[in-house]
Each structure stands twice: as structure tokens, then as C-alpha cells.
Image (cartoon, rainbow, N blue to C red):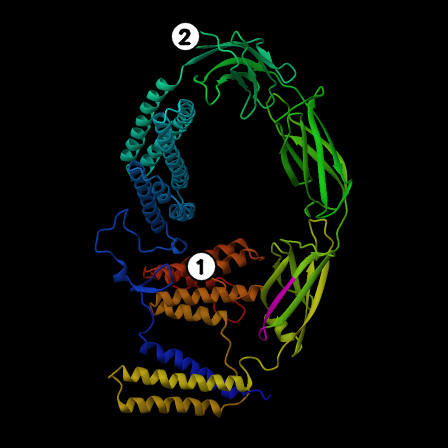
Amino acid sequence: MPQISASPKLVLLILLLAITGFSTPALGGFPTHEDIHTPNGMLTPQSAQQSPETTNNSSQPRHRDPSKVQSEEELSELEQWMAGQLGSRLGDSTVKLNQGEYQSARSVVGDQYNDMLSKYVDVSGRTKSTKDDKRAKQFKRTSEDQKEYAENVSEYRQTYKKYQQAKENGNDEKARQLARQLQNSSDQIDNTGQSLTQNYQNLSNTTNTDFTEETNTVEEINSNISDQQAEIRAAEFSQTEISAEVESDESSFLDPVTVSGELVDENGTELENETIQIQLGENRTQTTTTDEDGDFTITGRPTILSLGEQSVTIRHVPKSSSIYLGSNTTVNTTIQQVRPSVTISQKPKQVQFNKSFAVTGRVSAENVGAGGVPVVITIGNTVLGDVKTGPDGRFSLSKAFPKSVLNGQQQIHVLVPLRDRALARTTTKAPLSVQSTNTTVNLSAQALDQRNISVHGNLTTVTGVAIPNETIVLRSNGMKVGTVTTDANGTYDSQIRLPAKLAEKKEKSELRLSASYAGKGTNLKPSSATANIQFDSESLFSGSTLIWFGIIGLLGFIAMSGFAIRRSDLLSTSNQSDEIDYISDEEMSESNSDESEVIPEVTASMLVNRAKTALSEEQFQTSIETAYAAGRHYFMNADESILEDGQTHWEFYRLCQNRDFTEDQLEGLHELTQLYEQATFTTRIPSRKSAKRAVEIVSTYDIAEGGSNTNTK
């Protein structure tokens, strides 16, 4: 199909520029500094955004999108407003709690609170102060305590209703069981309430919000439940008392803690067949029962207790239907350290990626198994997993073998990661042979236009097992043109933009693209694939397609011009004729020009000069925006693997961070990006100082197109 000549292309470009340039005033013009951006991206008049009320901590700041707020002053203002909103929600939750609306009390500090908190964390992380980082943690802890407290109080109230119903029905055993549940719930409420009020106090000290009312509400609820529970205990239970003494002042895993004692009721009567428990660390207990005289002897082997003198708790644990309340006491003993031994075995002895692999073993001392002991299993820098030993000291771990362990002869390390505990830190190892695994890369590619390519494919083992989170390098004619990363399913789907030099050198209708996987840092073998990409000689903006776009553009221009004329009484008939004659002259001039004429390419040096001109004419926003465009143009020319399409200003900066630019270049780009964002996305009018600084930054770049690098005064 014949290609359109250079002359019609220029005509079309002029028409398109005319449409965008002349139709805009008819539609209301460009946004000014009197407009601001709202979070949803719409432009809203500034006057419509401002509240007639005086701004305070409860008034929302104008810059609502945290990602667009940069200055320390704005960040501080936004942080204070968010803190006020979070505090207000905590207060509303406490009101709901006091009214008995427990579900509402939890909802108020639910999803919306968490969304606001995540934004608050983002903002506090960007300020210079560390105080707001601490406040963010306090707000998180307080909301968690608030939800737990509301849940505990709600559960207590529901259980109390059931207790009252059981008493009315004369079911004493059921009532006693419920009374014990109420006691446990009351203890939880007391603990959570104390933590919650302490968090309120911390927030009161670090924010402008007074949480005195909330604190008083929680303390009042705690007091009411405590008084109510005292009446229930007196009506349902008898007190018990436990006495105990340790047989030896020193204890160890091989010389266990042995405690003897007695359990009696409030009248001194010995209690038979009651459960006694010794606690040797979190969730590590041994139990026994009292004999007919109320006496007991109990033994426990310390494993993770800290060395030195320790308090060991001895507890009476009554049955749920018992008439007795529980009681406890403590004894002191000095813990000595013992070094355990670890035995391991693994199956199979030779392993590959994704194949089943199991490690088993036992932690013991003098053939006595150590239960409840943590074990960490590693190969090199890869942690296969962590487990705890069973009652007899045995452990096991089964999983698919990971790709991150290098192939060859390796060592499995099994570690008991204790330090200054009853059992000493211990490790052992065993040999393991890791075999490499063949991989396959699949590549499909399609030209979107003369420079942009769509690529997709996958990375698998030769047996079809997906390989996630691996990087594949794309090259053409030996030049790296991009990288892709496989997703959880081992697939990739992306677009790449050919560097200008490569696009110029490629054959008119075909290009060969390769995808290479190196397998670096894994037990996977390298693999590669190639694809031939066919380029249409007729692209979207060539031939008859372009002519049709020109016709459509011309019709659009005529329609928009007519619309503008009808909306305005300022245009006279003679002016209209002049404008039509002007366009006709342009068309005639372009149609008579040499077909080899091309539109000059915009260069970085041209943009720098335009930025300087705008600065001298006191068009500060235009100067900053043009300077930023010059800087962006410079970095793209310096590294052609950086793509233009679809990159926001900060995404573009992060791309440059991953390239071989100097720290000074990146610092300059960071400052330039901040200046651009402040000029473009906030309502603050850019200053001469900001514009001058933007021009100074881009003037330092080594621009090869012949632009001036002289400083702007």
C-alpha cells in the first residue's frame, strides 16, 4: 500500500495541533492555579474546596492525597489532621462501648480506621520527626486493644445473661460453670482494660487529643464488672489455698525441678483429687493430682527457662463444675545449663527442585527427650523451616525442595537456637547432594508499532513445573532491551520499547528477539528462547490510515471551531475569514514544501533553552515543567533501556535508581522531580527560586545536542 508523503503528514500534524490549541479555549481553557486536584483526579475550583470554617485539627487539609504531599509543613499538617481523625474514631468507639453497642464499637475502629492508619503510617514515615512514627504504633496498639476489649466485654455480658438464666432455672451446676467462665472473662477484661487506658494516656501525652473521658469510661466498665464478679464468686465458690516448697535450690534438665505441697479449702480442709500444675515457661506445664490428704509432688524438666534464679509457678486448676476457686503460689530455684545432642536423618540423600524432601531428628540429653524445643533447619542461606519437638524430643519437616539452594554438595544444618537457657545452643549437620534441574523458557512476541513490542511466555522445568519470581533478560542483536519477572504461575506478560538505535538498525519488516534465563543463585539450569517479530510496513500513522485520521481531525477542528464561534460574540466575520485564510495558507505552504522535509526532533538542549526563556519571562511553572521534561529527556538518552510510556514522575525516578547513574545525578533528579511535583500537583504558585533551581539542575547535565550549560542568573 503506498506510503503517505511527508507533506500530508505535516498538514495533519498542523491540523491536530490546531485542534488541541484552538478548541481548548472554547471548552473553558486550561486549569489555573486557582484549581486544585482532588483525590479522584478531578479538578475542582479552590474556592469550592475551602470550608468557611476556621481550619483546625478536625478540618481536612487541602492536599488530601498523601502521595502528592511533599513539603515538611504540609506533611506535618496532614499528619496532625489524620491523628485527629484516628483519635475521633477511638472516642466514637468508646461511646458505642459505653452504650452497649459492641459490634458498632468494633466497626468504628475496623476497616476504615485501618485504611486511615495505613495512610498515617505512610505520612509519618516521610517526615523528619520520629515522634509521629511512635504515635502510629500507639494508634495501632490502641485500636487493637479497643477491639479486643469490646469483644471481651460483649462476651462477658452474653455469658452473664446465660448465668442469670441458669440461676432462674435452678441449674446450679450450669450456673457454676458459667460463673467460672465469667471469672476468666473478667480477668481478661481487667488486663486488656489496663493496657487500653495506658495507651490512651500515651496518646494524650503525644497528640493534641484528650482521652480523659475515654479512660474514665473504660475504668468505670472495669469497676462495674469487678464488683459484679465479686458477688458471683461469693455466691458460687469456696476459696482454696496452696502451699509448696522446692526440694533443691538448683535445677536443670537432667536434675529437674521437684516441688512438694498441700492444697486446702478456706476452712483448712485437705482437698483430695484436685489438679495441680507446674509451669516451666510459656505453654510448658506438667500436672499431677492431690492425694487423700491433699498432698502432692510434681516434677518438671526446664528446657527454655532462663539461667539463674527463676520463679516457678505452682497452680491449682479446678474442674469447671467444681465449687472451688483456683489458687497459685511460686517457688524459687536456680537453673543450670545442659548441652543437648541432636540427631538427624534426611530422605532422599539426593534432591532436586520441587521434589519431596524430609528431615527428621531428635533433641535429647542422656537419651532423655526434650519436648517443646524450637529447631531451625537450614541449607546455606536458605531456611527450610522451623519446628518444635514433640513430648519425646522428636521433630520432622517435610516440604518440596526449594530452588534457592545451589546445586552440588551441600550441608543440612539443624540448630537449637537457644541462648542462656536451660538447654544450650546446639547445632549439627549432615551431607546432602543437590542436583540441578533443566528449565525451559517460552517466548511469544508481537509488534505493537515500530518501537513497542508485547512479550509473554513462561519459565518451567522440563517436566512443566512453574518457576516463579525469576528474572528473564530480553535481547536483540546482542543488545539488552528489557527484563521481565515471572509471576506465581511462572508466566510473564509485559511490553518493551526498543531503543532508538536498535529500532533504526532493524530490518524493515523483522526483528529477532531472545529471552534468556541465567539460573543465577539457584539449582536451576540456564535456558533461552527466540522469537521473530514481524513489523507491518504500514503502521497506524502511515498510508491511508493517516489520511483518514487527517480527515477526521479536520472535521473535528471545523466542528470545534464552529462551537467556539457560536459560544462567543467576540469574533467578527472578517476575523473568521482571516482565520480560515490563515489555515489555508499553512496547508498551501506545507503542500508546496520539499517531500524530504521532516519536523525537527525536540532535544534536551532545546527544552533547557525554553525553560530558561520561561524563567526570564517569569513563567515559573512553565519553566519548571519544561526543565523537568529536559531532565527526563536527558536520562532517557543516557540509558535507552529506560522506557517513557506509562511512567509517572516517581516511577521514572525509581527506574533511574536501578541504572548506572552517579549519586550526584540521582540526587539532582530527585530534587528536580520534587520541584516538578510541587509545581504541577499542588495549589502553591511556584516561586522564582524554585524555577531557577530547576533550570540550574538541568543546566549541569552533559547534553550532547549542543545546548548551553551556562548557569541562569
Looking at the rendering, in which quadrant would you find the C terminus?
bottom left
Residue 626, position in %: x, y? 42, 67
User: Is 527 drawn above or below residue 446 in the view shown?
Assistant: above
Mark 1 neighbour class, 10 Å CA radius: few under 14, some 14 to 19, many 20 or more: many
Give the residue number, with chain letter if any, for mark 1.
673
Q: Is residue 254 magenta?
A: no
Picture residue at 35% right of the left edge, 29% below the top: 165
Asked where in the image residue 206 lies, by quadrant, the reply is top left
Residue 620, position in %: x, y? 35, 65
Asked whether residue 707 appears in the rendered view, the answer is: no
Residue 351, position in %: x, y? 75, 44
Looking at the picture, tell me which residue is in the foreground, 7 or 554: 554
Determine the secondary structure under disc 1.
helix
Asked whether residue 129 appears in the rendered view, the answer is: yes
Q: Is residue 347 left or right of residue 26?
A: right
Q: Amino acid at mark 1?
A: Thr
User: Is 218 drawn above or below residue 498 in the view shown?
Assistant: above
Give the residue number, with chain letter if any, for mark 2.
267
| Nearer-N-terminus badge (1/2) | 2
Query: Mostly what secondary structure, the magenta segment?
Result: strand
Asked where in the image residue 428 lies, by quadrant, the reply is top right
Q: Which residues are magenta?
A: 448-457
Instruction: Give the residue furthest to the front.
Output: 169
Mark 2 neighbour class, 10 Å CA radius: few under 14, some 14 to 19, many 20 or more: few
Picture residue at 40% right of the left edge, 36% below the top: 148
Q: Amino acid at mark 2?
A: Asn
Q: Is residue 457 left or right of residue 667?
A: right
Estimate the spatial distance between the alpha carbons at disc 1 and disc 2, rounded to whole Å: 80 Å
Q: Is residue 6 left or right of residue 125?
A: right
Q: Is residue 97 left or right of residue 6?
A: left
